[in-house]
Image (cartoon, grey):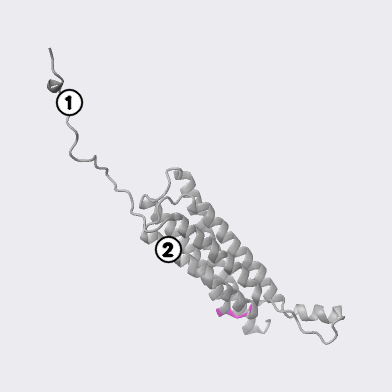
Amino acid sequence: MTHASELALPAAPTHAPTHAHEAPVSAISRSRVEFLFDGVFAIAMTILVLELRVPDLVDHRSSAELARGLSQYASTFGSYLLSFFVLGSFWYRHNHQYRYFQTITIPILVLHFVQLAAAAFFPFCAALFGRYPFNPLSAAIYVGCVLTFQLATVLAWIIGRRAGAMSVDLSDETYRRTLRRTLRQLVLATALLVFYVVKVTTGVATGFW
């Protein structure tokens, strides 16, 4: 008769199985970063409207005078509309990409802070460009802020993928497609900046502006 104590049992492993790549260490909760992004973008998009001014009229009933007054702020209104669209597109693209970030590592967090700094600084860039639309430096600062945000977005996307911090739902095709789209936006913004600065500089030199 075989006793229970005589039954051979497999020995428990003394060490947990090791993996080729360790899981990345999270620096902060995903939800905290997401809430911060939503808050900063909501404030930045609201602050944009503060640069708009109501013109002072001598005759409060004169539509012609009001139209002339509003026309003086045409560049400011244009900068507001453009900047609201840019910030909105930034927020939408970030929301689309952020769902694939499973772990927020320190490098990814730093790059997200760069994005937030660019977004918070953007209302100043919009006000500067609205007041001085034909100044090459104001255009360079405006587009430079856009490039900073986009570059941080690209780097966070690449670093997150290489660090294994992305969700398993992110396919190779989605990763490459998103990366190509962001890089195209970077190239387009750079090309627009160069074209605008050259155009404005040439226009100032020839007296067109």
Q: Check disc 2 and report the residue beneath it.
A: 111
**SS category of the residue bearing label 2:** helix
Residue lying farthest to the top in this orientation: 1
The amino acid type of the residue labelled 2 equals: Leu
Q: Nearer the viewer, mark 2 or mark 1?
A: 1
Is residue 176 inside the magenta stretch?
no
Decide whether the magenta segment is chiefly helix, strand or loop. loop
Residue, x 44% and y 52% (percent of image)?
101
Farthest residue to the right: give it: 61
Residue picked out by circle 1: 9
On screen, residue 112 versus residue 73, left or right, reads left
- Does residue 194 show up? no
Which residue occupies the foreground of this view, 171 or 56? 56
Q: What is the x, y in percent for residue 65?
A: 83, 82
Can the viewer see residue 160? yes
Quadrant of res 129: bottom right
Q: Which residues are magenta?
A: 133-137
Secondary element under disc 1, as helix, strand or loop, is loop
- Give x and y (percent) for residue 50: 65, 75
Q: Which of the 4 quarters of the picture holds residue 142?
A: bottom right
- Which residue in the rendered view is the most extreme toward the bottom? 58
Identified at 36% across, 60% down, the residue is 106
Instruction: Please state which of residues 74 and 92 is positioned toward the viewer in this rendering.
Output: 92
The spot of residue 138 in percent (x, y) is: 57, 78
Type of amino acid at the residue the image marks with label 1: Leu
Q: Is residue 134 magenta?
A: yes
